[in-house]
């Protein structure tokens, strides 16, 4: 047995082990067995999250508007979107200083579908090869990217699938809430832009962007896919955390939510992905709670 300095997997660890053991098999082939014998811990160990980021590339598309850039979008830019592999802010007009990409669509809820379809066209034309998965979120949505990658890792971006907060109305297979964020595989994006938008079969203008995207996905054979955890708990959330914890739901939510409109701590996944309708200050509160706050002396168990 021969030891040599560790180097080959240094990018997979916060601080690398000191040695790599090289064993020679009986047939003469060399097999590298990597043992983390010793590590000088100098901070949080994010090695698993960083390894997952290398394998699951996510582009984040944030729908915004000129009037929201200083009030809302800057706080999204300063917090969770820093963990996206690529982030694109889509607005009605281009702002090179922020920057935003203008898709030349009037602002207002009546133009959300057209704005979304043009955004996906832009992303397909300019950024298709920069990611495997394509997340659409609003400028008042908070997303935990590590948990999103954890959900997506078992799936192939070449399969026609998409994920989000599932509503069971208006579309046979249901559709995903726009506010909670929904994520398309690369194949789903390709079908939407190449086959769906030009076909005349998909609504590309008007209200209810999430419903219209859902109808188009169904027409294209893009499947809604279960995003609850192994305990049946929700990961994507179209309302604030306290609404889902306390059951403070509007009447329509009880009729449409595909997961039974459950509420309480036991209904939310420990690996929750998104929440919606968050004020700018809460973006920073979430940032602190998720990435910094911890109870001393308690090591959390993996609940999956």
Image (cartoon, rainbow, N blue to C red):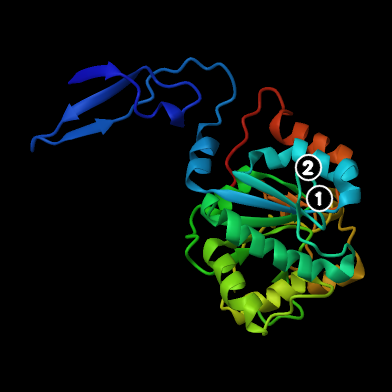
Q: Which residue is mark 1?
A: 139
Name the quadrant of the N terminus: top left
Where is residue 265 drawn, in percent x and y?
76, 49
Where is residue 234 drawn, in percent x and y?
70, 57
- Kindly indicate the quadrant of the structure image that contains residue 119: bottom right
For the question of whether residue 74 can be seen, the reply is yes
Q: Is residue 260 depicted above or below 296 in this figure?
A: below
Residue 45 vs residue 83, the one in the foreground? 83
Q: Is residue 37 depicted above or below 171 in this figure?
A: above
Residue 36 vs residue 194, the one in the foreground? 194
Where is residue 136 drawn, in percent x and y?
70, 57
Which residue is found at the position 72% from the left and 36% from the top?
A: 290
Q: Secondary structure at mark 1?
A: loop
Q: Secondary structure at mark 2?
A: helix
Q: Is residue 93 depicted above or below 298 in this figure?
A: below
Quick one: label 2 or label 1, which is nearer the N terminus? 2
- Kindly indicate the quadrant of the structure image that contains residue 284: top right
- Near mark 2 (Cα within 10 A), the count class, few <14, some 14-19 or many ≥20, is many
Do residues under tags 2 and 1 come within 8 Å of each other at their CB atoms?
A: yes
Q: Which residue is mark 2?
A: 76
Which residue is found at the position 24% from the left and 18% from the top?
A: 3
Which residue is found at the position 26% from the left and 17% from the top?
A: 4
């Amino acid at each position: 047995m021969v030891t040599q300095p560790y180097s080959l997997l240094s990018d997979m660890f916060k601080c690398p082990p000191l040695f790599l053991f090289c064993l020679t098999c009986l047939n003469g082939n060399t097999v590298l067995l990597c043992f983390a014998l010793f590590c000088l811990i100098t901070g949080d160990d994010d090695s698993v999250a960083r390894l997952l980021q290398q394998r699951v590339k996510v582009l984040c598309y944030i729908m915004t508007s000129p009037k929201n850039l200083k009030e809302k979008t800057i706080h999204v830019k300063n917090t969770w979107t820093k963990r996206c592999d690529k982030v694109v802010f889509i607005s009605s007009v281009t702002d090179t200083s922020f920057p935003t990409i203008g898709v030349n669509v009037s602002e207002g809820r009546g133009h959300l579908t057209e704005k979304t379809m043009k955004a996906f066209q832009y992303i397909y034309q300019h950024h298709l090869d920069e990611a495997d998965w394509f997340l659409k979120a609003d400028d008042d949505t908070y997303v935990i990217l590590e948990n999103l990658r954890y959900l997506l890792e078992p799936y192939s971006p070449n399969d026609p699938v998409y994920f989000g907060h599932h509503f069971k109305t208006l579309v046979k297979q249901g559709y995903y809430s726009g506010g909670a964020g929904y994520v398309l595989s690369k194949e789903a994006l390709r079908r939407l832009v190449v086959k769906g938008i030009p076909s005349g079969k998909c609504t590309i203008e008007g209200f209810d962007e999430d419903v219209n995207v859902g109808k188009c996905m169904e027409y294209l054979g893009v499947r809604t896919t279960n995003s609850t955890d192994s305990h049946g708990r929700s990961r994507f959330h179209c309302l604030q955390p306290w609404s889902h914890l306390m059951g403070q739901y509007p009447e329509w939510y009880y009729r449409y939510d595909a997961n039974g409109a459950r509420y309480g701590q036991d209904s939310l996944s420990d690996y929750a992905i998104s929440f919606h309708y968050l004020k700018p200050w809460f973006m920073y509160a979430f940032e602190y709670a998720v990435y910094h706050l911890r109870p001393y002396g308690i090591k959390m168990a993996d609940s999956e």
